[in-house]
Amino acid sequence: MKKSIDLTIKTAALCLFILLFTGCKKFLDEKQDNKFTIPQTLADLQMLLDNYTAMNTGYSYQPEVAADNFYLTTTDFNAISDNTQKNFHTWQKEDQRLADWAQLYKMVLNANTVLEYADELIVSAADVEIAGKLKAAALFYRANAFYTLAQVYAYPYDEHTDSPYGIPLRLSADINIISVRATVSETYRRIISDLKQAANGLDTTRPYPNRPARTAAYAALARCYLSMSDYVNAGLYADSALQLNNNLIDFNTLSTTTPNPFVRFNKEVIFPAISSTANCLAPARAKVDTILYGLFHTNDLRKVLFFRLNPNGSVAFKGDYNAANNGNVFLGYTTGELYLIKAEALARQNMLQPAMNMLNTLLVTRWRNNSFIPFTATGQQEALTIILNERRKELCFRGQRWTDLRRLNKDAATQVTLTRAFGNTGFTLLPGSSAYTFQVPAGVIEQSGIQQNP
Amino acid sequence: MNWKYSPLQELAQSDINSRSNTFTINSGLKYTVTNALNVETRLQLQNAYTDGNNYRNTGMFFTRNLVNMYSRVDGAVVNNPVPKEGILDRSYSRTRTAAARVQVNYGKKFNAYHELSFLAAGEIREARTNTESYRVYGYNDKNSTSTPVDYTSYYPTYNNISGTLLIPYQDEFRQSVLRFVSVLSNAAYTYRSRYTLSLSARRDASNIFGVSTNQKGTPLWSAGSLWKISEEPFYSFKQLPRLSLRGSYGYAGSFSPDVPAKTVLQYYPPNFTIINVPVAAVSSGSNPSLRWQKVGTLNVGADFGTLNDRLTGSIEWYNKNTVDLLSSRSVDPTTGFSTMVTNSADLTGSGIDIELNAKILTRKIKWNTAVLFSYVTNRVTKLKRKTPDVASSYVGNGFTIEPRIGIKPFSILAYRWGGLNDQGKPQGYYNDTLTTDYRLLMRTPSAQLINKGQAIPPYFGALRNEMGFRNWALTLNIIYRFGYWFNKQPISYTALYQRLETHPDYAKRWQKPGDEKFTNIPAMLYPVDNGMDAFYRYAEINILRADNIKLDWFTLSHTLNSPAGKKLFTNARLFLNANNLNIMLWKANKENIDPDYQRTLITRPSYTIGGSLTFK
């Protein structure tokens, strides 16, 4: 009896020692927490891109706060405790808002993580195609983030002169790489080439509304070329996108009385993107610019679908394509925007009738049934005036006005000077002002040593 | 339903409870091979269960708010996607721990001169925790029924206060496994029972996440020596019959568990985003250049005892060198991260630990006192990454090491205080000039900041008194900490306007010109400037001395001896133990703030009453 116990102990001890010294590796490879992982499958990477909060929201609110779609009363202006919002609204040099820069570069990091791991994680023949599509989507997200950053922190694009004030183009997830600013033309060249590559790899359809399809890459190319005043390419890519999706909602089918007339992810939405939240943008404070509101004809349904009257006669915006209206704006791609890009591109190339046809196709869905009289134009200038006017109306509170101002201010015919007044203090933003480029957040300058905007 | 929040009613209606059970099985076997050699094995199995319930009936704001938020009024009909009943959250967690240890002991005295002992052990441990939690809506606690809801449709919120939302889905499953493997060995050689040399080495490894296997093990070794002076033939100091000297050097390399070198993703459940698919986020980034933090410790000490051990004690001095300190630092946000754990500095530190035990009374009344005292100091010797030299990087609570040469780690740096101006605005100094430009003040170079001292106490210890009389014994433990500082949380007008957060200083604020002579509490100004709050928060007047003396715990026990003649048991003991008492005996700050619990709930004291019986 004693002998057998001895033997058992000896065996147990021996086993444990063997386990300790040889089986260690496998024993320790078990995951510590099954909510965490190092990227192991392509599905993990897809989950990273599907993170709607990280990839589709938090785009900078600054362009909308600084643009001329809304005004604040002096009381509401004073009530804002966040000085950064006040400074953006009055075009002061402001470098204390880090959140948008951080969020947009987090998108870049997520995209770079996918680009770096996708090929490594291919285990079967079928994976090759999946990895390719993941990389195409990642390139789209990255280019879209770069484009947004360029509208906020980089000088406007100019085909004749380059500027050193582009954005840092981070193309790797390695945190040890030092950030440096690319020039403006390098920035746009990278955005264009990434988007073209994305368009090649993306599917024409998408299973979830948060993801980009090929249409989104074309739409982004159209928007980017337009901001560069490259109207030929802008028109071509708007056309490519519209061939894949030209859905328009007949606004006569929408209820004019509900607080949110538009459904989130409606059929006009090609890719959803939402700005970060600024309390001055909330409908309770942001009063719609009176000139803008005055542009809408009584028979234009957008007058009642986009806006509601406040008891004191001022106007609030309610036409959010994200169906939320709580201090942020929808700045994703829609079919409506593509019609307008195509129309403008055609008019710029003096193809006036096709341009007007394009515009009228959009507008007939915006007006009350049987009330719309199609627009006609006899000269190029008249056509452009009509189209830009309609662009202003359709894309108000969409974060696009700022980029349009940067572009249109280059032409004496379309320049505008913005003014605001609070109490006895007045503010003016002149065309071509350096205030059309926001300051890089101080936290970034301090940590990376990159050059601040003048 | 009513949409009001009534704090007292909330308290009365709340029904939160949790239960836990723990079962432990211990077993051990010892096998003696020879007199000098034996093998021991030990096995421990433990199962612990916790379940929790949080039932919120329709009387509670949480439930009413959710029901109302999703309600939809169609004419006279009110639709309630979230049923008008209570909401029950349940959670259940189970932890199974298994640990096994094998130890080989060898000890032999060869003759009067040589003695050798050796120990080798291997230990393996696993703790596996499974947690499940879920929520049911429309729960009625009287008849234990619930109602299903539609988690997949978007509902417009009442009056569009939050756009369109899904009904919150709270079901979650989680599993975590912690595994440890250690191997260790000690060897000691003693000559003439006076001189001892010892060597020890161990390697600990665990399944710490994201670190490749070959880096998981952290090595540790030490070498030491001991000299029992009082055993020497020449030793003749009768008042101090016990005296020995010791010294050692140890070295350890470590990776902090939350510092993976590879990219780590964290999964989130579908309800994390409005798309309703599971998603992931990068929780920490890839940092291929991460190195082990290495610590070398040199230790010298003496142990002594007077006649009959009336006074015993030890004194120890150590020096600790840390190379490649791992600490969380702010990094360029362009990387996608705002902070990251990196090898940021080299530190050197030293300290003294003194312990004295005195038997003051040993007769009818027994009284023993133990005094423990420690002093520790350290400084940064080398900086591996630079922090921007602006105030906003350095001011703070001192909770983080922002290493800087010449400044002790965990120092609290603060803005120089320039009093209030005649509008009640706090003023600071930039280049020795008074200013209320708070943005400028946030750029103050660190050399112009005031270094108040460390947020961790350099002097600390305890005083323990054990008193006995007949069958009664009382032990009191008093702890003390000196020489450190804390940041008082002052009034914030941003918090007051935004969250109606009140503060006792409100009544003492600046209200009219001239008040600046009597008060340092800024005026309530409108519009609110959050820069003013940020400056005031970290101004030197809000850095207070944290020194304190507290009664930490006591134990009162009563021993019963077996009644004469009846040998039922050898002895029985009853005790009352009070922990976390947190009774402040003295504190340095005049504002009556407990630096450990500033505007947070105090950890409640725990009381244990118990008894034990010993049988022969």
Image (spheres, grey):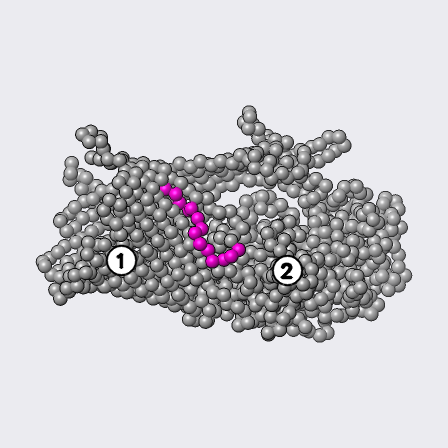
* Residue at the image position 35 percent from the left and 48 percent from the top: B476
Residue type at the position of mark 2: Pro
The chain letter under disc 2 is B
Query: Between residues B312 and A140, which one lies in front from this camera angle?
Result: B312
* Residue B245 found in image quarter: bottom left
> Is the residue at mark 1 from the same chain as the one at mark 2?
yes
Quadrant where the N terminus of chain B lies?
A: top right
Please give the name of the residue rendered at 87% of the width and 47% of the height, measured from the top-left corner.
A299
Q: Which residue is mark 2?
A: B522
Mark 1 and 2 residues: CB-CB less than 8 Å, in contact?
no
Instruction: Report the front residue among A130 and B340.
Output: B340
Amino acid type, callout 1: Gly
| Mark 1 Cα-neighbour bin, 10 Å: few <14, some 14–19, many ≥20 | some
In this rendering, does residue B168 appear at all?
yes
- Please check the rendered image and state whether residue B57 is part of the magenta-colored stretch, yes or no: no
Residue B603 lies, in percent from the top left, at: 46, 46
Q: Position of residue A199 (x, y in %)?
A: 64, 57
Q: Residue furthest top?
A: B143
Where residue A277 sits: x, y (%)?
67, 54
Quarter that holds the C terminus of chain B:
top left
Q: Pinpoint residue B308: horizontal percent, then vertical percent.
A: 19, 54
Task: Locate residue A139 relative to residue B367 in the image: left or right.
Answer: right
* Segment colored magenta: B577-591
Residue beneath the point at 65% across and 47% down? A209
- In space, the residues marked 1 and 2 are separated at their CA atoms by 52 Å
Is B579 colored magenta in this rendering? Answer: yes
Please state the chain letter of the residue tagged with numbered disc 1 in the rendered image.
B
Residue of label 1: B313
Residue drawn 75% across and 66% down?
Answer: A406
Is label 2 in a helix, a strand or a loop? loop
